[in-house]
Image: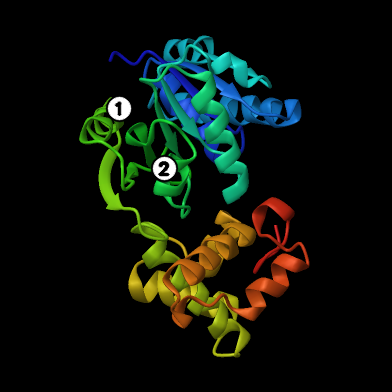
Amino acid sequence: MQIRRVGVVGAGTMGNGIAQVFAQSGFEVRLVDSSSGALERARVAIDKSLAKLVEKGRVTASDRDGAFERLTGGTNLEALADVDYVVEAIFEDRQAKLALFARLDQLTRPDVILSSNTSSISITVLGAATNRPARVLGMHFMNPVPLMSLVELIRGQATSADAMFTAAELCMRLGKTAIEAADYPGFIANRVLMPMINEAVFALMEGVGTAESIDTVMRLGMNHPMGPLALADFIGLDVCLAILEVLHDGLGDPKYRPCPLLRRMVAAGHLGRKSGQGFYKY
């Protein structure tokens, strides 16, 4: 199947980044979100991102204009009825994703692949909400999407080899590197990353070091580009907590137990960059 038209559901940070890279790569993109405000914020974010790329000489002004021409937004899921491929990028809530996949299954052609940008929720479970589990897979982009080259492709229990091949080819067309992961909680990236962030929060809670000292050790001692607490702020502490809960519930191992300090900060609304305060103030 020739994929020309791509639907992206969810206009948040990940969704607008995914929509941008598809539009930049020549695809017609339909970005759908239930909130018109989110769509407007996405338009502004994409405009800024493309402007920076033009400024740095990575894309031409003509390429930027072409990407915008290929991108449309709206609040009605019906706009995805004739797309060739779908990427779901809504918030990390299992029930919301299940309901959305059931609806997308009804709306789109039976041959269309339904992919999820989920960072931890089971692809097998999402596929079971549809009549096409062989054509449901995980397509987990890294943030910020326009700059990060990795995409985790997750094969559910019923995902076909053909669907995985199609997704891998798409990644190549986007200029991304695809790595396949099995459908276990957290997949590869978050299975390794989130326990590190969680341990950093425990170290902070127990007074082993300040946020600045913990992050500096990891940056200068381990050559990480960003310390784990600053990274948690960037990801969103609520997102980190949700992923850790999936790991803890799905694997049943106490080593994935979310740190009480992380829970307390999320309860207080200190979610990181997006709220203006997390482990650092913004």
Mark 2 secondary-structure assignment: strand
For the point 42% across and 24% down, the residue is 22
Front position in the image: 139 or 144 = 139
Q: Which residue lies furthest to the front in this view?
A: 131
Indicate which disc, 1 or 2, sits on the residue closer to the N terminus. Answer: 2
Q: Is residue 282 left or right of residue 50?
A: right
Tag 2 residue = 141
For the point 41% across and 61% down, the residue is 185
Mark 1 secondary-structure assignment: helix
Regarding residue 55, the answer to whether it shows in the image is: no
Q: Which amino acid does label 1 sit on?
A: Leu
Q: Quadrant of residue 10?
A: top right
Front position in the image: 109 or 266 = 109
- In the rendered image, the vertical position of residue 215 relative to residue 183, given as above or below: below
On residue 153, the disc is none
Is the C terminus in the top left, top right, bottom left or bottom right quadrant?
Answer: bottom right
Is the N terminus in the top left, top right, bottom left or bottom right quadrant?
Answer: top left
Alpha carbon separation for disc pair 1 and 2: 13 Å
Front position in the image: 65 or 183 = 183
Tag 1 residue = 170
Q: What residue type is labelled 2?
A: Phe
Q: Is residue 12 left or right of residue 188?
A: right
Tell me if mark 1 has few (under 14), some (14-19) or many (20+) residues whose alpha carbon lies within 10 angstroms of its own. Answer: some
Q: Residue furthest right?
A: 268
- Image coordinates of residue 249 in percent, x first then y, are 51, 69
- Image coordinates of residue 62 in percent, x first then y, are 44, 10
For the point 55% across and 55% down, the residue is 235
Number of numbered discs visible in the structure rendering: 2
- Image coordinates of residue 19 in percent, x first then y, are 50, 27
